């Protein structure tokens, strides 16, 4: 197996170079780092493939009147403290007051941009926010929680999204955390959402739902394979 991550920043450029070892010094044979490493944009491409698939499925299979991607929802914007782009540390500024210099946090507006917005036949406005999560991560405590409970990684990501986009801030819109685990397990809210919007008539309904889960599985496994393969050394002459 590779000794370091070979994800490239761009074609022919430098590689990530992260050493592929676990905390105990053993080789990272499960490819944990490669599954999480976004050098080269592989993680984003996997996410975007599901985002685009979901929008297409809603329009072409479910025949919703309107659906689009990357929609700004001002009701869920938040003011948060800025962080250093390099270290991730909170950013402060010094302000002179009558009592002397005071340290104040630098605040920035974090815009809420949801992956897929749609309006169904009843006029309900909904927002589906796509996420991939991994039961195995660099966080040992999170990995142990996920190992003890099936679907724990997905449920934690769903809870995070509901905390980030609280229903009370936008009570007239429906939020769907569309979470998929990296190995293919669907989050608890994915199947109910697909069933809610699938065609009502049989056998079209059963075929549409079977095709949806099959295509999600294909996108997930294809994305995982791309991340793992991109982390391996390239033969001489291959960019």
Image (spheres, grey):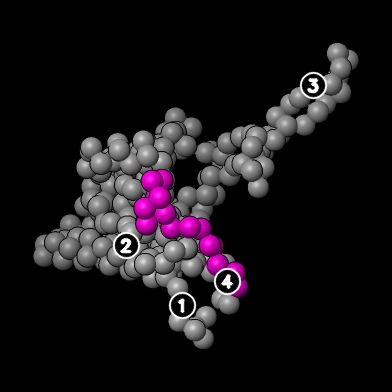
Q: Residue at x 60, y 73 (%)?
A: 13
**What residue sits right under mark 1 in the picture?**
234
Which residue in the rendered view is the most extreme toward the front? 25
Q: Which mark is residue 10?
A: 4
User: Viewed as shown, does residue 183 lie left or right of 127?
Assistant: left
Nearest to N terminus: mark 4 or mark 3: 4
Nearest to N terminus: mark 1 or mark 4: 4
Q: Residue 199: x percent and y percent?
A: 21, 59
Spatial CA span between label 2 and label 1: 23 Å
**What residue sits right under mark 2 in the picture?**
220
Asked whether 75 or 49 is in front, the reply is: 49
- Check disc 1 and report its element: helix, strand or loop: loop
Spatial CA span between label 1 and label 4: 14 Å
- Check disc 3 and report its element: helix, strand or loop: strand
- Check disc 2 and report its element: helix, strand or loop: helix
**What residue sits right under mark 3 in the picture?**
102
Nearest to N terminus: mark 3 or mark 2: 3
Q: Determine contact: label 2, label 1, CB under 8 Å.
A: no
Callout 1: few (<14), some (14-19), or many (20+) C-alpha neighbours within 10 Å?
A: few
Image quadrant containing the N terminus: bottom left
Residue segment shown in magenta: 13-27
Q: Tell us which disc is closer to us: 2 or 1.
A: 1
Q: Residue at x 23, y 47 (%)?
A: 192
Q: For the stretch drawn in magenta, what is the main secondary structure?
A: loop
Q: Residue at x 48, y 32 (%)?
A: 169
Nearest to N terminus: mark 1 or mark 3: 3
Spatial CA span between label 2 and label 4: 23 Å
Q: Tell us which disc is closer to us: 4 or 3.
A: 4
Callout 3: few (<14), some (14-19), or many (20+) C-alpha neighbours within 10 Å?
A: few
């Amino acid at each position: 197996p590779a000794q370091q991550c070979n994800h490239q920043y761009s074609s022919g450029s430098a590689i990530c170079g992260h050493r592929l070892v676990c905390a105990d010094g053993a080789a990272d044979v499960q490819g944990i780092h490669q599954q999480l490493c976004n050098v080269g944009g592989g993680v984003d491409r996997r996410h975007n493939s599901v985002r685009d698939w979901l929008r297409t499925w809603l329009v072409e299979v479910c025949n919703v009147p309107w659906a689009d991607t990357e929609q700004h929802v001002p009701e869920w914007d938040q003011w948060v403290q800025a962080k250093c782009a390099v270290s991730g540390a909170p950013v402060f500024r010094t302000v002179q007051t009558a009592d002397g210099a005071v340290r104040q946090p630098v605040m920035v507006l974090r815009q809420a941009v949801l992956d897929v917005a749609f309006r169904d036949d009843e006029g309900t406005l909904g927002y589906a926010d796509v996420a991939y999560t991994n039961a195995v991560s660099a966080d040992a405590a999170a990995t142990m929680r996920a190992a003890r409970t099936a679907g724990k990684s997905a449920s934690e990501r769903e809870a995070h999204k509901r905390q980030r986009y609280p229903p009370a801030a936008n009570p007239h819109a429906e939020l769907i955390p569309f979470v998929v685990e990296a190995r293919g397990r669907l989050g608890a809210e994915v199947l109910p959402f697909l069933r809610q919007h699938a065609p009502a008539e049989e056998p079209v309904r059963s075929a549409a739902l079977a095709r949806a889960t099959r295509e999600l599985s294909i996108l997930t496994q294809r994305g995982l394979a791309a991340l793992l393969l991109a982390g391996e050394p390239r033969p001489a002459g291959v960019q």
